[in-house]
Image (cartoon, rainbow, N blue to C red):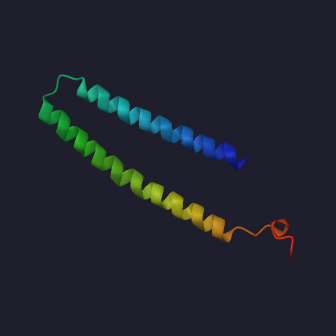
Amino acid sequence: MAMQGQRGTVLRMALLVSVIVAGHVALWLSDQPFDTKLRLTLINAAVWAVILLPAVGVMLWLRTHQRLNAPKDQDSNPGR
């Protein structure tokens, strides 16, 4: 069951990245001047970094703490 959750997360992240890339391609194919395209791309990248980097950090922190706090499997240590 956990594998389906991970697959869904990966699918959502791939969809998000695809939409971001498509938006940048559409911007760069538009009739805007070069300096406007560059400025908008840099602003967009900075905003996404501010949004996504903390979210990824929290996700990794939570995953680590869930593994540390998970009950230990009794069958994994047959010597006891």
In the rendered image of this protein, does residue 23 appear above or below residue 8? above
- Image location of residue 14, percent across then percent down: 49, 37
Residue 67 sits in quarter:
bottom right
Residue 63 sits in quarter:
bottom right
Left or right of 34: which side holds 58? right
- Image location of residue 79, percent across then percent down: 86, 74
- The residue lying toward the viewer, choosing from 77 and 63, is 77
- Image location of residue 34, percent across then percent down: 14, 31
Residue 62 sits in quarter:
bottom right
Left or right of 61: which side holds 28? left
Residue farthest bottom in this picture: 80
Left or right of 68: which side holds 52? left
**Residue at 34 percent of width and 54 percent of height:** 50
- Image location of residue 4, percent across then percent down: 67, 43
**Residue at 36 percent of width and 29 percent of height:** 22
In the rendered image of this protein, does residue 45 appear above or below residue 25? below
In the rendered image of this protein, does residue 75 appear above or below residue 15? below
**Residue at 37 percent of width and 36 percent of height:** 20
**Number of on-image labels:** 0
Give the quarter of the figure containing the C terminus: bottom right
Left or right of 15: which side holds 20? left
**Residue at 31 percent of width and 48 percent of height:** 47
